[in-house]
Amino acid sequence: MASKAPVELVPVGTREVRLTSPDKVYFPERGITKREVVHYYAAVAEPLFGVLRERPTNLKRYPDGVEGEPFYAKRLPKGAPDYVETAKVTFPSGRTAESLCPTEPAVLLWAANMGTFDFHPWPVRRADTDRPDELRIDLDPQPGTDFADAVAVAAVLHEVLDEAGLVGWPKTSGGRGVHVFARIRPEWSFVEVRHAVIAIARRVAERLPERATVDWWKEERGERVFIDYNQAARDRTVASAWSVRGRPRATVSMPLTWETLPDVDPEDFDVRTVPALFAEKGDPHADMDGAVGGIEAVLDWYAADERDRGLGDLPYPPEYPKMPGEPMRVQPSRARPQPAE
């Protein structure tokens, strides 16, 4: 008679979460198993729950490990235990969904047991899923650039956020990029918050024209860091702090301070190293919820850019409906008139 697959119980909060197939290898390059990933999330459950609490959250799942095909779960998967709650979100198409909404740490381990590596929270809370309480800026190094370039751009971004009266909190992306978040009052729409990010990004790019760009079309970016303003669009998300990334080394998106950012190597933060760092140094973003600002000044920048310099909106991603005031979604090389024969 065949023996049953091994099952372990992992304590978290007031519950124990079932860990199935614990010896399944998720990261073959380093021999990292499902057990290590789930226990990693148990070790960082406190700060990760602080990041995800009451936020609609997409799950990036790798049921066959990092070498398998991942997929995003934007709706609560079937078979969830009764303590897993949801929040209703509206997509750009107008369709709605009940999305996972963590309300206790056990939810994180339950998701990890289903092959979730990264948690992708919306920048809203369940109380109002149409009003972001977080402004997010994604510094994405293009081919020919690297993490050091993203750090250099982040330093200028820090200055611009200070001028805007916003407190930025940097983290590694888990790869070559840098993410910077700022808490804001939930008083503005997704469109307004995206406009605020565009205004901030333009100022950064203008101060570092050789190293940063807001050009949506890849053919125009060159070897610069793209400030991806469209990560502020409705239904666009980035991996949360403390999330495991689907990379061979099982790197982690690590929260940092502005002081430590220039001196780190993002490859040093992974499933095996981060729990000890958290135990020793705590959460670098622990005070984030106490630093809430507004985007009134930045929206004034956007309005002035539009009024005085003719700089209006920028293209949305291709799957979005046409938005008011948006320019044509055509690559510049294809939009140019052809010469007469």
Image: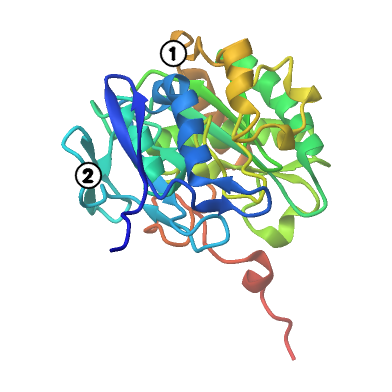
* Residue at the spot 27% in from the left edge and 25% down from the top edge: 15
Q: Give x and y (percent) for residue 330.
A: 57, 66
Relative horizontal placement of residue 73, taking residue 215 as reference (left or right): left
Placement of 208 over or under 167, stated as above or below: below
Is there any visible trace of residue 295 in the rendered image? no
- Amino acid type, callout 1: Asp
Helix, strand or loop at disc 1?
A: helix
* Label annotation for residue 171: none
Q: Is residue 210 above or below residue 261?
A: below
In the rendered structure, which amino acid carries the disc numbered 2? Ala
Work out whether residue 128 or residue 242 is closer to the camera in this orientation and state it.
242
Q: Label 2 near label 1: C-beta < 8 Å?
A: no
Residue identifier under label 2? 80
Residue 38 lies in quadrant: top left
Q: Position of residue 178 (x, y in %)?
A: 66, 34
Q: Which sits in the foreground, 86 or 148?
A: 86
Instruction: Determine the image quadrant of residue 180.
Output: top right
